[in-house]
Image (cartoon, grey):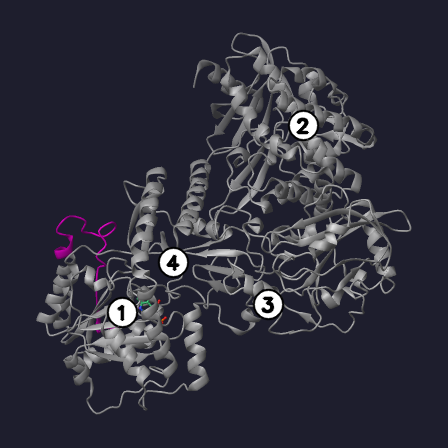
Amino acid sequence: MTSSMQHWARTLADTWGIEAELSPLPGEFDLNFLATARDGQRVVLKVMRPGCGTEFVDLLTAAHLHIGRHDSTVPAPRVLPTRAGEPWCACPDADGESRLAWVLAGLDGTTWATVRPRALALITELGGDIARLDQALAGFAHPGLARDLKWDLRHVDWVGSQCRDIADPARRTIVQRILAHATELRPALMRQPMAPIHNDLNDHNILVATDEDGARRITGLIDFGDIIAGPVVAELAITGAYLVLDHPAPERALAALVAGYHAVSPLNEAQADLVWPLLLLRLAVSVTNSAMMQKARPDDPYVVVSEAPAWRFLERAHALPDALMAARLRVACGLPASEAATRVAQWLDQARGSFAPVLGTSLDAAPTGALSVVASVTPRDPFRMTAEEAQDVGAAFAPGTTWLGLYGEPRLIYTDAAFRLGPHRGSDRRTVHLGIDVFMPAGTAVCAPLDGVVEIVEYRDRHLDYGGMVILAHTTPAGDRFRTLYGHLTRESVARLAPGQRVARGDAFAALGAPGENGGWAPHLHLQLALITDGVGHDWPGVADPDDADLWRSICPNPAALLNLPDAHVAYRPLDTGTIREMRRAHFATNLRLSYDEPCLFVRGWRTHLFDEWGRPYLDAYNNVPHVGHAHPRLQAVASDQLLRLNSNTRYLHPAQVEFAEALLAKMPPHLTHVFFVNSGSEANELALRLARTRTGGKDMIVADHGYHGNTTGAIDLSAYKFNRPGGGGAPEWVQIVPVADTYRGAHRGTDAAERYAGAVDTALERIRARGGRLAGFIAETFPSVAGQVIPPAGYLNAVYARIRAAGGVCIADEVQTGLGRLGEYYWGFEQQAARPDIVVLGKPLGNGHPLGAVVTTAEVAHAFDNGIEFFSTFGGSTLSCRVGTEVLRIVDDEGLQQNARVTGDRLLAGLRHLQSRHELIGDVRGIGLFIGVDLVTDRATRTPATRAADQVKNRLREERILIGTEGPADNVLKIRPPLTVEPDDVDHLLETLDRVLGEARAQTGTRREGGTP
Ligand SMILES: Cc1ncc(COP(=O)(O)O)c(C=O)c1O
């Protein structure tokens, strides 16, 4: 401690009775010390700048004491009184000058500035905490509250003159515009109730703690130095102003904050509407202040750096329509989107039944048709709606009849890049339909349901756009305005119309276009209603992002009334995911686990992507079963063709059985000539065990540690990954374990590692001899997967096999994870080891999801097995399975998927190695082709597994809609093994997202143990 610190440590001991070590904390003008007592208690000693008035310190300490008395759950620090019971005192500093000092209890956590990701749920919690803070402050009175602060949003006239210091004229204009708008709003602001507010909850004044499981909570609202009596809504706007900066979804973040606040301390419409303009105003004040400072201190680069995020935000956001932002914040509070919205909705409801028929006829009897991601398989490729598919929408279920497409329905038919919300194929996209479709023949007249005026008329000729589109403006008898949109009209309809033109109720103002002029669709009307007239402009979204759908549903509600239909008739009923979860809990054992903290529900798949019930795409970098991609059309065709004909078993002859056998054997080395078809990897291993035992007459097996071979009784006995885990019961006496040949974590890492690991087989054989057993064989996953995606050193398998064979055993290669081209350079894992197994076990990818396993072996082993007992597997080798299996093998070849595994796998591995150079957390990147492991460590030197970080990374990636797993004895290895259809764009998507998520993990581990700094 410096002598000044020693002085203040003595003062703390003498005046507060706290013996502690001091360390300095940041502070602009005052001295702040973190004091840690011997018992671990942490407090903050605040020594005010020389000359600081007593009123100010009294204000701050009184505010803290008041908050604590009013609501002790508000995460504001407690004031610790002096021994004499005073909240603060005047004490001499080391030079004898009098300073005002006070003490606060220390808080856990790190500042919001360091928190990544800034999850919406945490922001909502913050909103609630701020509401409770404001409620607690509401009854606080102190003469010091009435002060002039340039940060008081009611008195910002100074910005008008000072913004001349902003050098860039475009930026100056932004500030001037915000200021002009704020001036208009001033009367509304001045009408707001006044109360004490913190007034500066920026991201250094909010503390967040992370618990052992990575869960976060707000632990501190600190530094009340700017407290004033102001409009309470300014508190939210000011906090929001910092929260939105560099947030990936700023508008949603703000809505989450407002929602959290409103849930505790309800806001009215006027308050919700003020938040956004006040937020912009706070940022305008901030950048103007920076410009002044920059002028005063032109050589200080910090000023420019610190204002950059505010400019980045303002340049984008100042132009966002006020009405739309107000609607967003109102909806976040559960309020109607606009003043008029409720009245218009009520009027439409009352007038239902009295509107002129929009398509000239009653739609009461028209059926509805589903285009939802749940119910429909259009488009076949969710990334590409073909012209034929668009023209044929509904042709399958409603040929030639009038039918209705649902409001609020999530659909995959919007495949144009314009619907995408990010740069990648698998980026989020807009899916939720905001209108009703009426499918009728081209040329059908479109009539106005009520009087209106043409506001916008356009022809949009892009594939899957509207073609002809008209927006009519209407006024209710009470004088409220709303609009209706009609899409997919003829080119001629829009040529005839002009903005300003009046259209009377029942007037046929347009006609339904044919596919050649309506965006390419089966002829239909898209009818949409909008209750907000400002801010939506020409470009109403016809389809909303599912994560933003609440907002858009309240701006563009169900227009059924205009068609004289009940809302419910045309409203999409979402899948009831809550009930599905409940039923699962009721009927399934809890060890049937779900992946991820927030489980996924998928209803469609395509190649390397999966889609949830709202049509959100997920990049599947985890599942190796859909080897040739999800929902492969050739497999669907083959399966349905075979099901049309026959699905029988191996007791009868069929060409499909031998075709499959030949196709499989053609991929095997020539010494493997016989196959058995079964239904799963487990069944295949079970059979392999029997084969080894009948061949050798032995019972004992040698297995690799942490191996997994299936869930059946025999397969579990071979799986150290199961029997050596809690509840597993340990190894059977006939099983000997050898260590997994892991050169990163295992005992042997040098050039002789292969021989040393293989040497463990000698000891295992010794143990078998010692117990009087007889060897049946050795089994291992060729590249151990659950052991952490391990690639054994070259020569390992041969060295093991030589020992096993010398002892009379049979060598089994479990290729369930590694076979069929996944390794890129090699079709099978044992090829990489130049080894010749006696038995090869296949499963997972062989049927691409159809239950299919196989055992491939030598003639000797197969013949030895025929000891009199018939071998029969009812479904193994069914006609259907054989057709599917053959087709999978052909697709791998026809589509060059093995080659893709090599090229795209190399791209992924190179990218991961680059990430390793950027992130200390990555200890090792290993893999071949698309069999990849990323070993996370807390310390590269000790290779300590970063288990918790791996779990967090996996779950964060899932939030970002990328699926990977974790594996390894310590569950710290990221397991990446996508379908072989993965493309370079998918790899880039994964790498970019992983880079960001690893950055967050670093921020988190790097700051977890920091103390709070009021
Ligand atoms: C290496 C290995 N062998 C066997 C099996 C068991 O296969 P199944 O689940 O099809 O019974 C698995 C399953 O994960 C596996 O990874």
Circle 3 residue: 392
Query: Can you tell which of label 1 and label 3 is closer to the viewer?
Result: 3
Percent x, y of residue 175: 67, 24
Q: Tell me which numbered mark, 4 or 2, is placed earlier along the sequence.
A: 2
For residue 762, above or below residue 23: below
Percent x, y of residue 989: 44, 48
The residues bearing labels 3 and 2 have C-alpha atoms spaced at a distance of: 53 Å
Query: Can you tell which of label 3 and label 2 is closer to the viewer?
Result: 3
Answer with left or right where residue 198 lies relative to residue 873: right
Q: Tell me which numbered mark, 4 or 1, is placed earlier along the sequence.
A: 1
Residue 73 appears anywhere in the view: no
Query: Can you tell which of label 4 and label 1 is closer to the viewer?
Result: 4
Answer with left or right where residue 4 lies relative to residue 922: right
Q: Quadrant of the N terminus?
A: top left
Q: Tell me which numbered mark, 3 or 2, is placed earlier along the sequence.
A: 2
Circle 1 residue: 731
Tell me the number on the disc at residue 1006.
none
Q: Residue furthest left?
A: 806
Answer with left or right where residue 314 lies relative to residue 764: right
Residues rendered magenta in the picture: 730-756
For residue 604, above or below residue 178: below
The residues bearing labels 4 and 2 have C-alpha atoms spaced at a distance of: 47 Å
Q: Residue furthest right?
A: 477
Circle 4 residue: 978
Which three-letter amino acid code belongs to the residue tagged 1?
A: Ala
Which three-letter amino acid code belongs to the residue tagged 2?
A: Arg
Residue 744 magenta-highlighted:
yes
State whether label 3 is within 8 Å of ligand 1: no
Work out whether residue 162 or residue 814 is closer to the camera in this orientation and state it: 162
